Image: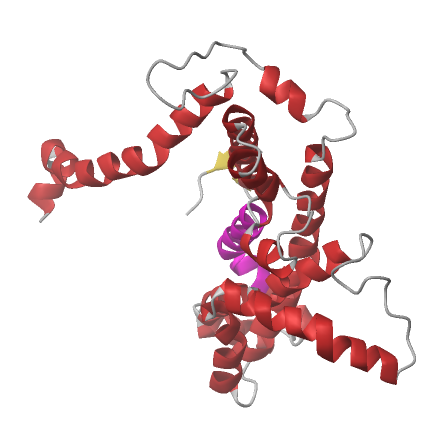
């Protein structure tokens, strides 16, 4: 086995199928989308004319205009990303810490919190739609609270918050399980030594456990941010295709309803670049340093 791995040609043979597959389903579509975004229109058939317009579609995305909702869509995606990072992930971390530290019924609670993850987003959306249109209004009436005009999903001031809630709820268990697995992989002798030194509860969590699972926190943050920027299915179903400003929804409408394929391609490229930029920022924030300020490669 060592002889095979030491041969560069052998490694290339094993890696080549994956590289070709990745290139075909990821790299080539991104390159084609980039090319389409620089044209005035994508030719629908042989003989159709199109010409190069450069960054015109990208400028159009952020040019002020009454009908241009893309800047607001970007703001909404950033708002959802903030909710994911500062609400969803801390809650997932809290659950993971409680379970990893030996809570009663650990296995049952772990499975219970993970159940929404395996449920289809369509089912989750329809479930919460019934809650917003039936159970929640009745609860508000019983408590004599004011129900928003046009309902929770019909009011322009509240629909964004209530359309985000199902997605946040659905993936709490996903991040919890990732963090839980990382916490359980911490060597017991490290935890026992910390407890002997007087670390317990929050002190143990913040000084020992959380710092030791930084690589997994980075993974959870990456998944959370990327998922926020490409959020599509839950708001689309929950709001019954009504006006909801998010980048992925705007791209879908421009492409399949308005048939502006080049403009939609520019929006798609913006989402790709946005995800890439935030991934680079995360890598920079989670970089490790040696003594003397030299950067140390991640383990």
Task: Tell me what residue is drawn at x 75 percent, y 57 percent.
Answer: 159
Q: Main secondary structure of the magenta part?
A: helix
In percent of width and height, residue 275 lies at: 54, 38
Q: Indicate yes or no whether the magenta region holds residue 217.
A: yes
Task: Tell me what residue is drawn at x 57 percent, y 49 percent.
Answer: 231
Please indicate, yes or no, whether residue 207 appears anywhere in the rendered image.
no
Q: Taking 288 as reference, is 165 left or right?
A: right
Q: Indicate yes or no whether the magenta region holds residue 155.
A: no
The vertical placement of 134 against 68, above or below, is below
Task: Tell me what residue is drawn at x 86 percent, y 62 percent.
Answer: 149
The vertical placement of 65 against 167, above or below, is above
In percent of width and height, residue 226 lies at: 54, 46
The vertical placement of 237 against 126, above or below, is above
The vertical placement of 23 against 47, above or below, is below
Q: Quadrant of residue 30?
A: top left
Of 282 and 146, nearer the camera is 146
Q: Which region shows up in magenta?
A: 209-227
In percent of width and height, residue 40 lies at: 52, 15
Q: Quadrant of residue 155?
A: bottom right
Looking at the rendered structure, the number of numbered marks drawn on it comes to 0
Task: Tell me what residue is drawn at x 28 percent, y 34 percent.
Answer: 24
Q: Taking 124 as reference, is 59 left or right?
A: right
Q: Taking 187 as reference, is 73 left or right?
A: right
Of 167 and 189, nearer the camera is 167
In percent of width and height, residue 10 lies at: 10, 37
């Amino acid at each position: 086995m060592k002889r095979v791995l030491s041969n560069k040609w052998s490694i290339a043979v094993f890696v080549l199928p994956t590289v070709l597959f990745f290139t075909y389903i990821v790299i080539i579509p991104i390159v084609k989308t980039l090319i389409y975004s620089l044209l005035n229109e994508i030719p629908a058939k042989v003989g159709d004319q199109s010409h190069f317009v450069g960054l015109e579609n990208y400028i159009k995305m952020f040019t002020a205009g009454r009908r241009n909702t893309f800047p607001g869509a970007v703001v909404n995606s950033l708002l959802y990303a903030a909710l994911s990072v500062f609400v969803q992930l801390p809650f997932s971390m809290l659950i993971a810490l409680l379970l990893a530290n030996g809570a009663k019924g650990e296995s049952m609670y772990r499975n219970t919190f993970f159940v929404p993850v395996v449920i289809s987003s369509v089912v989750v959306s329809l479930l919460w739609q019934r809650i917003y249109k039936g159970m929640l209004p009745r609860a508000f009436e019983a408590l004599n609270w004011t129900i928003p005009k046009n309902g929770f999903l019909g009011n322009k001031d509240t629909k964004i918050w209530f359309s985000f809630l199902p997605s946040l709820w659905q993936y709490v268990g996903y991040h919890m399980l990732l963090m839980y697995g990382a916490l359980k992989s911490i060597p017991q002798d490290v935890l026992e030594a910390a407890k002997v030194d007087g670390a317990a509860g929050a002190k143990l969590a913040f000084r020992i456990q959380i710092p030791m699972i930084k690589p997994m926190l980075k993974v959870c943050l990456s998944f959370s941010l990327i998922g926020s920027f490409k959020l599509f299915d839950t708001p689309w179903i929950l709001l019954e295709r009504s006006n909801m400003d998010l980048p992925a929804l705007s791209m879908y409408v421009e492409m399949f309803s308005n048939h502006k394929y080049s403009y939609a391609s520019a929006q798609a490229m913006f989402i790709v670049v946005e995800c890439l930029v935030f991934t680079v920022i995360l890598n920079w924030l989670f970089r490790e340093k040696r003594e003397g300020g030299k950067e140390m490669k991640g383990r």
